[in-house]
Amino acid sequence: MAGAGPAGLHHVFYPRRVAVIGVTDTPDRVGYNILESILYGGFTGEVYPIHPRHEQVLGCKVYKSLEDIPEPVDLAVICLNQHATVEAVESCGRAGVKGVICNAGGYRETGEEGYDLERRLISVAEKYRLPIIGPNTLGMINNDYNFYSTFYPMKVPKGKVSIISQSGGIGLTVIHMAIDEGLGINKFIGVGNCSNLDFADYLDYLENDDSTAVIGVFIEGTSDAGRFVRTAGKVARKKPVVVYKAGRLAAADYYTQTHTGSAAGSFHLYRDILHQHGIFIVNSASELVAACKALALQPLPGGNRVGILTHTAGPSVVMIDYLVPAGCVIPALREETIRRVKQIIGSDNPPVILKNPLDAAGLGFNRSTYGGLAEAIMADDNVDILIAVYCLHKNWELPVSGLMAAHEKHKKPLIVNYIGNWMGCRQDQEFMQKAGVPLYTAPEKTAVAAAALVHYGMMLKGGGNLDCK
Amino acid sequence: MAGAGPAGLHHVFYPRRVAVIGVTDTPDRVGYNILESILYGGFTGEVYPIHPRHEQVLGCKVYKSLEDIPEPVDLAVICLNQHATVEAVESCGRAGVKGVICNAGGYRETGEEGYDLERRLISVAEKYRLPIIGPNTLGMINNDYNFYSTFYPMKVPKGKVSIISQSGGIGLTVIHMAIDEGLGINKFIGVGNCSNLDFADYLDYLENDDSTAVIGVFIEGTSDAGRFVRTAGKVARKKPVVVYKAGRLAAADYYTQTHTGSAAGSFHLYRDILHQHGIFIVNSASELVAACKALALQPLPGGNRVGILTHTAGPSVVMIDYLVPAGCVIPALREETIRRVKQIIGSDNPPVILKNPLDAAGLGFNRSTYGGLAEAIMADDNVDILIAVYCLHKNWELPVSGLMAAHEKHKKPLIVNYIGNWMGCRQDQEFMQKAGVPLYTAPEKTAVAAAALVHYGMMLKGGGNLDCK
């Protein structure tokens, strides 16, 4: 948007005073849930609900109009229908509000008539240089500021990953997957129809947002793909950007066009161009979460050589299927490492294949052996990053301490793959991730996570040209 | 294996008397954990632990040798090293044991010397016409018979899905994912090195196993790919077979060869040939579980036309990316359906795009509206199967009853995608799946599940030629 710029968006993401225009007392309605979301999220700024007839909603005094609010408002969240929203934006402009979130749908995604209405919305906003998140959006969360402005009241763990999503449903999917993965979220932006703020504007803003370390993007399509790609590529030089692009088929285009008004474009074209700009591309919401988690927790590896320690071979076969096409290499271990591994294993033990991936078979069960083997591989100059696979077992202690010790000693990135169910892994996952080591339970996600780290490590070294196809 | 055949395997999967050769009292060791696994799993047959010196392990009397056991043994589980295993198989043959599980590695996967040893193992087994599961295997579970013979003591929910896995680690991954998905397992077979029983033998056995309704296969490679494919294709005419093929890269071949002794072969060749034989192919462990769950719970659709009901569009865009290449069609709704949808929505409501996928936007929040819309789409003759997407919400009731009522009325397959985290969805997932409706939380998995149902529905109608690429 002309004039808004990253600085202009600060008031939107960190508002001191927020008006909620169109609150109701019906828990079914958006206007109720936006207010509850803000209150439930623990917002510490001022909230001014607005409705011409209500006196009080959710314990808050309700104002008749913007003009009744005693202080200047930074952000207005508009929970009215598509027509009333346009009038409300006009009144926000007149009242000197600095930004708006427009939740209602009913614009370009519904056809020509809606597009006309959206053009009116945009022209009103431009008149007052008013940035709009949306319309047709779930809303926005700034977890760094306890500001939850969506119509899904929730609390999400805090973290350094910010998500830009063209879909509320996929955005919420990503947020819930992040909860399951123990990944903290910093900001969530539902871009909606991108009326006068596009992906590129949000990327620009997050580039300079110190509380965001990693950016995950779900995109179906945009009217200015060139600017999106160039901006993503520029931002990725400063902090990792991971993109999940949907609407990959020509057959799907008719549909993306009807709900956000953007053609999905050719997936392959997008993928190739994003790739050229150094962006890491994923193929599902769970891969997006997996990649962002690793990038948020771990340092970048010095190279693309992946060591794998396991006591069951299959997961490493699966991982190699992902790692190698993503530009990773599975290097040979050095002679010195082989010698150390032999020492740890002892001579009377069952045969272990002394190569990378190191399948420690029966020896991998033992916690101390496992930690020693991890340490030996991490010490190897041929290895830039270690993936450690371990199966939960009723009678065997998990190798947490050995892995953490190896990681602390060598400072190389470490990714852990437990084979176990959600409940069984939860405690170790929380513990290790608090110490910066991401833990997954699916080998495919583990591999994508490692590939994402390698990708950005190589890109910053000028290697580039890596992709997870 | 010559002579074993499906009938011969019955004693292996449903043994009345089991010897565990090489038990120990050390919880680190395989010999301890196999016995504990059998006891912990609740096996009701007779168990005879064998060790020359121990008197008692885990409360069981220990026998000195097979000859000391008073009754004929059906199955022997051999927990010795690779050399002693060969001798033990010989003694099993002499004692008239009907089948063995050989856990030890150290055979063909370790090189020429190991291959020679495995040839000896096979020739001893052939002499006595003794079927071997393994060697180099995690073991086997027959949950239909409370017989857990792996070295991972566990209990898994019962169900109709059986898994054949070339990897213990991926097998355990699948089992733990099944636990998380609320999917019951019937049998688990870790094929190991496939010494004298190959994938095709297990497929033949499970084809005639009445307690197995769906077969999931994880395969890296096999020495007789032709027989595997032909057998899988034959079995798939009777019950669905879902295949996850790993070791997809030439670069990975060296590694699969070192741990199971089989070349991974060309993935594309495998995929194309499996496809021609009507097998549904998946691309991850979680997709394998997702597809098997839908096939185990739902009837097959009468055609490939997928209706989608949602109140957030993005997930349906993601799903279409999976559904269309898998041979599904997203049909237009009939006039009568549009009329019914309009009635349910009412005229004073926000704009809903009246097409398939039906994005009910704000109206989708309301439980009664949602159920009515689901019923209307299911009633549509253009629709063979319905996917229903719903976001968990703090203040809105979930649409369980409406969905179940629609499903019961129309008997068309229904797949539910909740947008929510593991804990938040658990209760509804259990409830709905008990009633036969599978619930997922990732749109990609939901789409694969629907595609799997469509695939087998079309195959049985002679349509064939469908695949999830």
Image (tube, coloured by chain):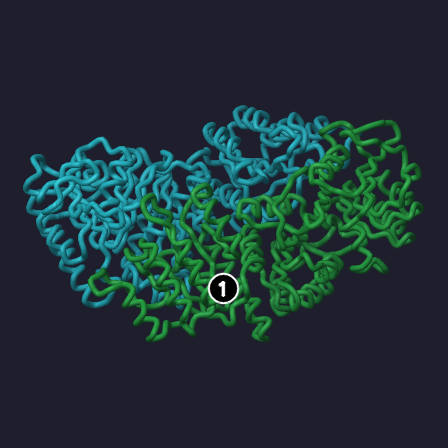
Chain colours: A green, B cyan
- Residue type marked 1: Pro
- Residue B10 percent location from the top left of the image: 21, 38
Quadrant of residue A311 within the rendered picture: bottom left
Q: Is residue A76 above or below residue A407?
A: above
Name which residue lies at 92% across and 53% down.
Answer: A127
Residue shown at 64%/67% (left/top)?
Answer: A273
The image quadrant that residue B43 belongs to is: top left
| Direction from residue B297 to residue A97 in the image, left or right | right
Q: Position of residue A110 (x, y in %)?
A: 76, 43
Specify whether B243 is left or right of B379: left
Q: The disc numbered 1 marks a residue on which chain? A: A
Choose between B175 and A265: the one closer to the eye: B175
Question: Residue B277, percent across and down?
Answer: 38, 50
Residue that numbered label 1 is attached to = A413
Which is nearer the eye, B36 or B121?
B36
Mark 1: which secondary structure?
A: loop
